[in-house]
Image (spheres, rainbow, N blue to C red):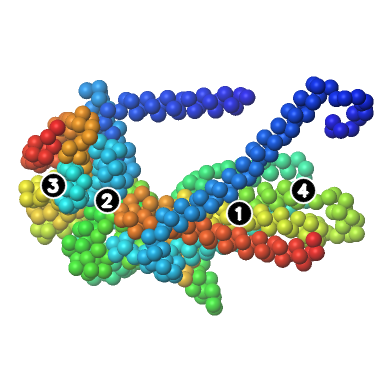
C-alpha cells in the first residue's frame, strides 16, 4: 500500500515536472551535442533578461535534422550544413550559430601541448595506417629538432557518428587525395585503423590512457583534460596552434558571401592565421513556419545571442561569429525568414 | 484447506452460500484470464519485437541479402553494411565471459552451500546478489579506468611476450598491449555475469536433500566428491539453466562492452585487438545514422542479435533435453 502511494506520488511529480517544462519552454530546439554547453548557458542568461525560455535537447545532429524535418521543434541544429537543394525541398533555412574547432591530440611521453607540428597529409597518412611509428621520417622532418620515440602509433577515433568526425574527415579529404578516395567523408566513416571511443569524452579518455596514441576532439575537451594538442600546417603553409584567434581568423577568411544558404564547411580555410579544422554549427529553421510566433521567438533568441552571447561563448572555448558574418545572417533573415 | 473438516449438511443449500459459489467461480475465471494474459503478453511482445525489427531491417536484408551476415564490410560512406564483425565479436566476448564466469560461479556457489561456515553464508550470499544489481555502465567505467590500464601495463605485455609464442593459439594472444579489446571485454562481461550464475547455482544447490549428502559423507566421500557426484548431478539441469541465463545477458550486454571493446569494425585474430559487438555497434551508431539504409542496417543488426540469442539458447535447450533423456527422466 505504502509502495503504491509512493509510486503514485512519483508518477504525479514526474507528470507535473513534464508538463511544467513543456509549458515553460517558449522555444524548443534539438540537435548537435557540440553546442549544448553554450546553448544551455545562453538560454539560462536569456531567460534571466527576457523571461523567455529556450529548451535545447542535445540529441545529435542527425536527430536534430530529423526533428526539424518532422516540425516537432522550432529549430534544429547540425554540425554539417545541409545542401541548398535539401533545404529547399523541406522549405528550411540555415545559418551559422557559433564557431569551434577540432584539434588532434597526442599522447607521446615528454611531449607538451603545442609541441608537435603536423601537416594535413601526414595526419591523413597516420589515420590511414600508412605512418605507423612516431619516429617516422615525415613526422621528424616536420618537427625539426624535437626528438620522437620509436613508438607505435595507436589511432583513436569516434565510435559514434558525429559532427566532430564530419569536420575532421572533411579536412582530411580536402588535403589528402588518398583519404578522399579510400575513406571519404561523413559523420561516420570506415576507419582503416584504430580504436573507437564514444563521444569526445571517450576519445579523450582513450588518448590519455594509451601511450603513443593520437585522436581528435573539440578544443574545449583538449583544454579541460590538459591534453597535448598539436599544431597544424594551414592552407597558407603556416603552422598554427588552435585557439580563439586562429578559429576566428578561419571564420573571417572563409568565403561566406558566395555560399548559398551558408552551405560552407570551413575546414582548410585560406588565411595566414587560420586554424585548418575550424567548424561551425548550423541552425535550421523553416522559412514559413506553422507556428510563426515561436519561430519568431527562436529568431529573436539568436539575434540576442549574436549581440550578447560572445562572453559566454568565449568562456566555454567557443568563438563567436565575426561581425561581418552576423550582418550576412541578418540580411539572410530579412530575405528568407519573413515572419 | 476449506474442503477438510466441513461437516456434511442436509437440505437445500442456503442462498448466501449459492451466491458465494458464483462469486468464487467468477473470481477464479478472472484470475485465469489475468494469468493467461500475463503468459500471452510475453509471447506477443516477443513476436512483435522480432517482427518489427525484421520489418525495420527489411531494406538492409533486401539490399545485402545473405551477404549481410557474411560480409565484414561496414562502410557508412559507401553505404555498404555487413554484420560479420559484430556477430563474431558478440560470440567471442560472450564465450570468454563464460569461460571465466562458469568455474568461478560454481566455486562461489559450492563454497556458500557446502564449505563456508554458517555465519558467513547469508552476508556473502547477499553480497553476490548485490553485485547483480550494479548498473552495467559502472562495470564499463571500472573496466575503462581501472582494469584496462592495469592490464595494459602489467598483464598484456607479458601475455604478448609469452603466450604469443605458443603454437596454434599464439596468434590469439599477440598484439599491442592497448588494454582495450576482446579479452578485456570478455573479462568485464565475465565479472558481470558471475552474480547471475552463482546466485542461481546457490539456490539450486540448497535444494539438494540433506539425507542424500549425509549418506555420501557417511560412505566416506570427501567434500569434492559430494559436490561432483551428488550435488551436481542432482541439480544439473537447473545449473545449466543458470549458465544460459548468464550467457543471454553476456550476449546482449551493451554499455560495459562499449567502454572496453574498442569499437572497431575490424576482424582480427588477436584477442588483444579491438573489435565490435552487435549491441555496442547499435548503441554507438544509432543516434547519428544519417541514411535510411544505415538505420535499416542497424535495426537489422538488432534482429541479428535476436537470432543469435535464439539459436544459442535453442542449442542449450536441446542439450538439456539430450541430457535428461540420457538420465532417463
Query: Which SS class for mark 1?
Result: helix
Which residue is depicted at the point 33% across and 25% down? A23
Q: Nearer the viewer, residue B59 or B150?
A: B59
**Residue A239, position as x, y percentages in the image:** 15, 57
User: Which disc number belongs to residue B206?
Assistant: 4
Does label 1 or label 4 sit earlier along the sequence? Answer: 4
Element marked by disc 3: helix
User: Which of the chains bears the disc numbered 2?
Assistant: A
- Pointer 3 residue: A261
Residue B178 or residue B130, whichever sits in front: B130
User: The N terminus of chain B appears in which quarter of the rendering?
Assistant: top right
Residue A194 image position (x, y, % from top left): 36, 63
How far, Cα to Cα, is label 3 from label 1?
Answer: 54 Å
Badge 4: how crowded within 10 Å, few (<14), some, or many (20+)? Answer: some
Residue A163: assigned label: 2
Q: Position of residue A276 (x, y in %)?
A: 17, 54
Q: CA distance from mark 2 to mark 1?
A: 37 Å
- Label 4 SS: helix
Residue located at (30% from left, 53% from top): B290
Few, some or many residues within 10 Å of mark 3 (<14, 14–19, 20+): many
Disc 1: which residue: B246
Q: Upstream in the sequence, badge 3 or badge 2? A: 2
Chain containing the residue with disc 4: B
Residue at 35% over, 27% down: A21
- Report the chain holding disc 3: A
State left or right for residue A328 relative to residue B296.
left
Report if the CB atoms under discs 4 and 3 are less than 8 Å apart. no
Task: Report whether mark 2 lies on the same chain as mark 1.
Answer: no
Q: Is residue A214 above or below residue A53?
A: below
Amino acid at each position: 500500500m505504502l509502495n503504491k502511494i509512493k509510486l503514485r506520488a512519483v508518477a504525479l511529480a514526474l507528470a507535473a515536472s513534464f508538463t511544467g517544462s513543456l509549458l515553460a519552454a517558449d522555444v524548443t530546439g534539438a540537435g548537435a551535442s557540440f553546442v549544448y554547453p553554450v546553448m544551455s548557458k545562453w538560454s539560462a542568461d536569456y531567460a534571466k533578461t527576457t523571461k523567455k525560455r529556450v529548451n535545447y535537447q542535445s540529441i545529435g545532429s542527425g536527430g536534430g535534422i530529423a526533428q526539424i524535418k518532422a516540425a516537432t521543434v522550432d529549430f534544429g541544429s547540425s554540425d554539417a550544413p545541409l545542401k541548398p537543394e535539401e533545404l529547399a525541398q523541406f522549405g528550411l533555412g540555415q545559418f551559422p550559430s557559433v564557431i569551434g574547432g577540432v584539434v588532434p591530440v597526442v599522447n607521446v611521453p615528454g611531449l607538451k601541448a603545442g609541441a608537435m607540428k603536423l601537416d594535413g597529409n601526414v595526419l591523413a597518412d597516420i589515420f590511414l595506417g600508412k605512418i605507423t611509428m612516431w619516429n617516422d621520417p615525415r613526422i621528424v622532418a616536420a618537427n625539426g629538432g624535437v626528438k620522437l620515440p620509436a613508438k607505435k602509433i595507436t589511432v583513436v577515433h569516434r565510435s559514434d557518428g558525429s559532427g566532430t568526425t564530419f569536420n575532421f574527415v572533411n579536412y582530411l579529404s580536402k588535403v589528402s587525395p588518398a583519404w578522399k578516395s579510400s575513406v571519404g567523408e561523413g559523420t561516420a566513416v570506415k576507419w582503416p585503423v584504430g580504436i573507437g571511443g564514444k563521444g569526445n569524452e571517450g576519445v579523450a579518455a582513450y588518448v590519455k590512457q594509451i601511450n603513443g596514441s593520437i585522436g581528435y576532439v573539440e578544443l574545449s575537451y583538449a583544454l579541460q583534460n590538459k591534453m597535448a594538442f598539436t599544431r597544424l600546417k594551414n592552407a597558407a603553409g603556416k603552422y598554427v596552434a588552435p585557439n580563439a584567434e586562429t578559429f576566428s581568423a578561419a571564420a573571417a577568411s572563409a568565403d561566406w558571401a558566395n555560399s548559398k544558404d551558408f552551405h560552407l564547411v570551413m575546414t582548410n580555410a585560406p588565411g595566414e592565421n587560420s586554424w585548418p579544422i575550424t567548424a561551425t554549427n548550423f541552425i535550421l529553421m523553416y522559412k514559413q513556419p506553422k507556428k510563426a510566433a515561436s519561430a519568431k521567438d527562436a529568431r529573436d533568441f539568436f539575434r540576442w545571442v549574436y549581440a550578447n552571447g560572445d562572453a559566454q561563448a568565449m568562456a566555454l572555448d567557443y568563438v563567436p561569429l565575426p561581425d561581418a558574418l552576423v550582418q550576412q545572417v541578418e540580411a539572410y533573415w530579412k530575405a528568407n525568414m519573413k515572419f | 484447506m476449506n474442503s477438510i473438516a466441513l461437516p456434511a449438511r442436509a437440505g437445500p443449500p442456503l442462498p448466501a452460500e449459492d451466491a458465494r459459489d458464483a462469486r468464487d467461480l467468477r473470481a477464479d475465471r478472472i484470475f485465469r484470464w489475468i494469468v493467461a494474459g500475463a503468459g500471452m503478453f510475453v509471447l506477443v511482445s516477443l513476436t512483435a519485437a522480432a517482427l518489427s525489427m525484421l520489418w525495420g531491417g527489411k531494406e538492409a536484408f533486401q539490399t545485402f541479402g545473405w551477404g549481410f551476415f557474411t560480409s565484414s564490410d561496414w562502410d557508412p560512406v559507401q553505404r555498404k553494411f555487413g554484420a560479420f564483425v559484430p556477430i563474431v565479436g558478440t560470440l567471442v566476448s560472450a564465450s570468454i565471459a563464460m569461460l571465466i564466469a562458469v568455474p568461478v560461479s560454481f566455486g562461489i556457489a559450492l563454497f556458500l552451500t557446502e564449505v563456508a561456515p554458517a555465519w558467513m553464508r547469508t552476508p556473502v550470499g547477499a553480497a553476490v546478489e548485490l553485485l547483480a544489481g550494479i548498473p552495467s555502465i559502472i562495470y564499463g567505467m571500472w573496466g575503462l579506468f581501472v582494469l584496462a590500464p592495469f592490464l595494459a601495463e602489467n598483464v598484456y605485455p607479458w601475455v604478448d611476450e609469452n603466450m604469443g609464442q605458443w603454437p596454434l593459439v599464439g596468434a590469439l594472444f599477440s598484439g599491442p598491449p592497448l588494454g582495450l579489446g576482446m579479452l578485456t571485454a570478455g573479462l568485464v562481461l565475465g565479472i558481470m555475469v558471475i552474480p547471475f550464475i552463482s546466485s542461481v547455482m546457490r539456490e539450486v544447490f540448497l535444494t539438494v536433500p540433506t539425507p542424500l549428502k549425509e549418506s555420501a559423507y557417511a560412505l566416506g566421500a570427501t567434500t569434492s566428491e559430494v559436490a561432483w557426484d551428488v550435488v551436481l548431478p542432482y541439480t544439473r539441469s537447473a545449473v545449466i539453466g543458470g549458465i544460459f541465463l548468464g550467457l543471454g545477458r553476456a550476449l546482449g550486454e551493451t554499455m560495459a562492452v562499449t567502454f572496453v571493446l574498442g569499437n572497431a569494425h575490424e576482424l582480427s585474430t588477436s584477442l588483444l585487438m579491438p573489435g565490435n559487438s552487435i549491441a555496442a555497434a547499435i548503441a554507438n551508431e544509432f543516434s547519428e545514422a544519417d541514411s535510411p539504409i544505415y538505420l535499416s542496417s542497424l535495426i537489422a543488426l538488432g534482429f541479428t542479435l535476436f537470432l543469435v540469442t535464439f539459436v544459442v539458447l535453442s542449442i542449450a535447450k536441446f542439450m538439456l533435453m539430450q541430457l535428461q533423456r540420457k538420465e532417463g527422466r
